[in-house]
Image (spheres, rainbow, N blue to C red):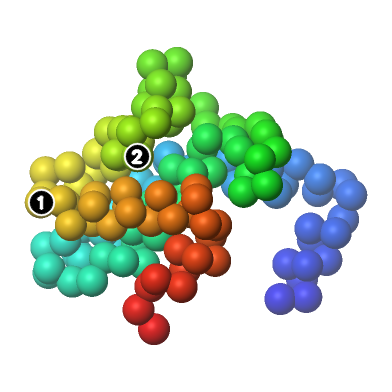
Amino acid sequence: MQSVLSRFSNPAMADQTLRIASDGCAKIQVFWTETVRDLLLGNKDCSRMAFGIAAYLEMLRGISTSGQHYPISEPAYAQGQQTLIHSDDYAAGLKLPAFDAWRDLDSHILDHQVVELRKIIRNQGVLAALATLPA
């Protein structure tokens, strides 16, 4: 843990945080797909994964819970996909390519949870959304 903290406190590594946090589309496809597919195929509780997806989609909007704007680095998304990201339709972002790897499965419960969690995050904040998850 200390090595991680010292690495990020090093001014020579200043770009690392943004680089690590950017291109979430690729990271979701690589690191989340197997878990999401397992949850969906096994009819398991998807609420924590739904929270992760909802938080990611809200982050893409580039607006903090205090209303401040911040830059987003998502090179995988073309201009047309920006429309999905900034849509008032909470489900629109689920059409992004980050989620293509499980589109062949029945994800209506996961999708519903994502939409509901996005509403909570946007209107009440992240902590309120986290409070809805099972212990």
The image shows residue 30, relative to residue 71, as above or below, that is below
Taking the spot 66% from the left edge, 40% from the top edge, the residue there is: 67
- Within the image, what quadrant is residue 36 found in? bottom left
From where the camera sits, is residue 32 visible? no
**Few, some or many residues within 10 Å of mark 1 (<14, 14–19, 20+):** few
Q: Residue 7 at what x, y percent from top left?
A: 79, 61
Q: Residue 43 at what x, y percent from top left?
A: 12, 68
Q: Are marks 1 and 2 in contact (CB under 8 Å)?
A: no
Taking the spot 35% from the left edge, 39% from the top edge, the residue there is: 90
Taking the spot 10% from the left edge, 51% from the top edge, the residue there is: 106
Kindly identify the amino acid type of the residue bearing the numbered disc 2.
Tyr
From where the camera sits, is residue 7 visible? yes
Residue 106: mark: 1
Q: Residue furthest bottom?
A: 135
> Where is mark 2, residue-wise?
90
85 with respect to 6 (left or right): left
Q: Residue 132 at what x, y percent from top left?
A: 39, 71
Q: Residue 107 at what x, y percent from top left?
A: 16, 52
| Residue nearer the viewer, 22 or 2 | 22
Kindly identify the amino acid type of the residue bearing the numbered disc 1.
Asp
The image shows residue 45, relative to residue 113, as above or below, that is below
| Residue nearer the viewer, 1 or 60 | 60
Tell me which label, 1 or 2, sits earlier in the chain. 2
- Within the image, what quadrant is residue 99 found in? top left
The image shows residue 64, relative to residue 121, as above or below, that is above
Q: Secondary structure at mark 2?
A: loop
69 with respect to 81 (left or right): right
Q: Where's the N terminus, which quadrant? A: bottom right
Q: Residue furthest front?
A: 123
What is the CA distance from the residue labelled 1 to the residue labelled 2? Answer: 19 Å
Q: Where's the C terminus, which quadrant? A: bottom left
